[in-house]
Image (cartoon, rainbow, N blue to C red):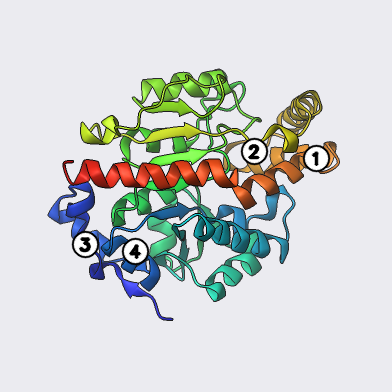
Amino acid sequence: MASSTVKGLPTPDTHLGLSNSKSAVVELVKVSPEVSAALSNGQPVVALESTIISHGNIGMPFPQNLETAKEVEATVRENGAVPATIAILDGKPCIGLNVEELEKLARLGRRAQKTARRDIAYVVATKGNGATTVSSTMFFAAMVGIPVFVTGGIGGVHRHGESTMDISSDLTELGRTPVAVISAGVKSILDIPRTLEYLETQGVCVAAYKTHEFPAFFTERNVSFKLNLGSGVLIAVPIPKEYSASGDLIESAIERALREAREKNITGNAETPFLLARVSELTGGASLASIILLDVIYNKHYVLYSAQRFFLFYNKARDGE
């Protein structure tokens, strides 16, 4: 089924209060008919990133990556929402992918550029293929009025970030884009305490579900969006204990991978793929098993239930209820 342009949706002004100048930019985006219809009818829509599909840097080659992507979307549907996987294909930002488009990304693998917010203009201008990260997925979700984005783990402040200043653009995006990001928290290869401090600096509301590892406050009134604070919300839902890898084993592997990265002078956006792949190797696939489970079920009932409820509260806040 052919995709439609975003102009078939309610205007972004309706959802996010965007200016008219931004409305012209939205014409560059293609929204699938299913996502367009769902947004028009006020149905729950959940944004999904596409880096996990094309970048087999954590050990998921084709066709495993494709099957994972399909299962993630199926899980979203089972929980009463419409999945909107986001990617840039042949220079066109696409919100909602069909099976052929998912397979294209999966086959492209690393040939599809890992695309953060800063890379969007380049990938579009060169008519390239881009797999969206958290920051770019948030950007496009907000553009078309999708208030909820579910992912495995967000980026953050890298270990030794106080010296390198290596901080993921995911954090600054959370500080300026009004989308609720529901995830398993911050990737364990990162400096979690400094990441939380940075999120506080960015004015991001951080909440946790059934854990005290993050600040444990959560409100169903969606106050952050009602007040038009302009920032996102991060809701952390930890992976179920029975599926989580051994903490000591993972931590030891992370420390070794970090040393190797420094020795090989691997920095910037090449560091996270290297660390994830190396940790998977050092743990005999234990970390990869957790990552796959996380990306397949996203804590199936908990995360998607939270996403669905947040969407309902968002609609009430938007409508002034």
Question: Which residue is label 1 attached to?
Answer: 286
Where residue 101 sits in the image (x, y, percent)? 53, 72
Mark 4 or mark 3: whose residue is earlier in sequence:
3
Residue assigned mark 4: 38
Judging by the rendered image, the residue that carries numbered circle 3 is 10
Which one is closest to the eye, mark 3 or mark 2?
Answer: 3
Kind of element beneath mark 4: helix
**Is 273 rendered above or below residue 205?**
below
Outermost residue toward the left in this view: 20
What amino acid is found at the position of numbered circle 2 in the picture?
Glu
**Would residue 117 be seen by someone viewing this image from the given angle?**
no
Residue under the point 57% across and 36% down: 184
Question: Residue 259 at x, y = what percent?
Answer: 76, 26
Query: Are circles 3 and 1 on residues that touch, CB within 8 Å?
Result: no
Q: Residue at x 34, y 58 (%)?
A: 43
Q: Secondary structure at mark 3?
A: loop
